[in-house]
């Protein structure tokens, strides 16, 4: 079974009925923060692997009609959810963006995507031709505690479909190897800022928050639970 099959045949939807819509407005705010910080004012934004389309829908609420949004998704089930959110300046496509020969945007986003892709380096290398700026959100699954316990990595593989695991350093090196120029990067703290329901996640939440306030890099490297938001060209 190819990696794409679980997204196309409904397997992923069965495990994640909301397709992570509940985290989308928070992710949109991280993206807005990055664009404002770097004084980028786009007129076209595209998201590859847009899932249920809620990140783009949240961005529309912020930017209004001044920006045109396009979402590409290969899952028919996710695309069906997206269709309920279509607006004059927000459209979704049940296609692979990389197959669209003439598609080009001010910003192309891959939010929690390439860790799911079998040929992830080939994917991000081809994505370079689709936009001026690119925004990646990359889960940093590799940490001291995740390697020592081993179960977290097995969980994100079985439950979330992650095929590749990254640290900040390997994520940035991967993008550079694929030809990208890194313009900016920041940590995002989903494990601290978003609601958690697992008792283990609740138990480690305060130590993560405290350690992160003292030394961000060490907290991420040792305790994990963070992602990396990258702006690149």
Image: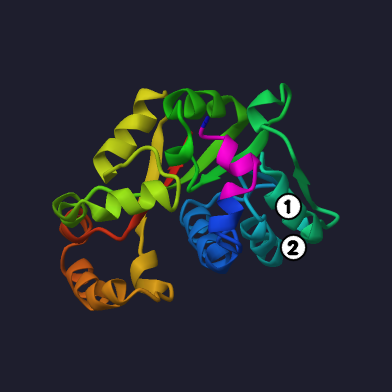
Residue sitting at x 50%, y 43%: 113
| Extent of the magenta region | 3-11
- Mark 2, other Cα within 10 Å: few <14 / some 14–19 / many ≥20: few
Residue 90 rendering spot, x and y as whole percentages = 77, 52
Residue 74 rendering spot, x and y as whole percentages = 66, 39
Q: In the displayed structure, would residue 34 be above or below residue 135? A: below
Q: Secondary structure at mark 1?
A: loop
Residue 175 rendering spot, x and y as whole percentages = 38, 32
Residue sitting at x 38%, y 46%: 157
| Labels 2 and 1 touching (C-beta < 8 A) | yes
Residue sitting at x 70%, y 47%: 43
Per the model, the C-alpha gap separating discs 2 and 1 is 7 Å
Identify the residue under disc 1: 67
**Relative to 190, is 84 on the left or the right?**
right
- The quadrant holding residue 121 is top left
Q: In the displayed structure, would residue 198 be above or below residue 121? A: below
Identify the residue under disc 2: 64
- The quadrant holding residue 102 is top right
């Amino acid at each position: 079974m190819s990696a794409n099959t679980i997204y196309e045949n409904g397997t992923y939807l069965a495990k994640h009925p909301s397709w992570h819509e509940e985290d989308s407005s928070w992710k949109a705010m991280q993206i807005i923060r990055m664009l404002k910080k770097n004084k980028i004012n786009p007129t076209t934004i595209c998201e590859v692997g847009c899932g249920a389309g809620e990140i783009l829908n949240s961005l529309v609420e912020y930017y209004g009609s001044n920006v045109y949004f396009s979402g590409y998704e290969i899952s028919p089930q996710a695309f069906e959810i997206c269709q309920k959110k279509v607006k004059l300046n927000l459209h979704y496509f049940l296609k692979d963006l990389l197959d669209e020969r003439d598609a080009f945007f001010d910003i192309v986003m891959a939010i929690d995507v390439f860790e799911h892709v079998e040929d992830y380096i080939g994917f991000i290398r081809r994505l370079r031709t689709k936009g001026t700026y690119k925004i990646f959100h990359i889960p940093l699954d590799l940490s001291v505690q995740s390697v020592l316990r081993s179960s977290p990595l097995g969980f994100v593989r079985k439950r979330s479909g992650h095929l590749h695991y990254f640290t900040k350093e390997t994520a940035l090196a991967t993008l550079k190897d694929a030809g990208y120029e890194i313009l900016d990067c920041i940590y995002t703290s989903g494990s601290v800022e978003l609601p958690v329901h697992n008792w283990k996640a609740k138990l480690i939440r305060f130590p993560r928050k405290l350690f992160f306030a003292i030394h961000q890099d060490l907290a991420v490297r040792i305790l994990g639970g963070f992602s990396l938001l990258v702006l690149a060209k």
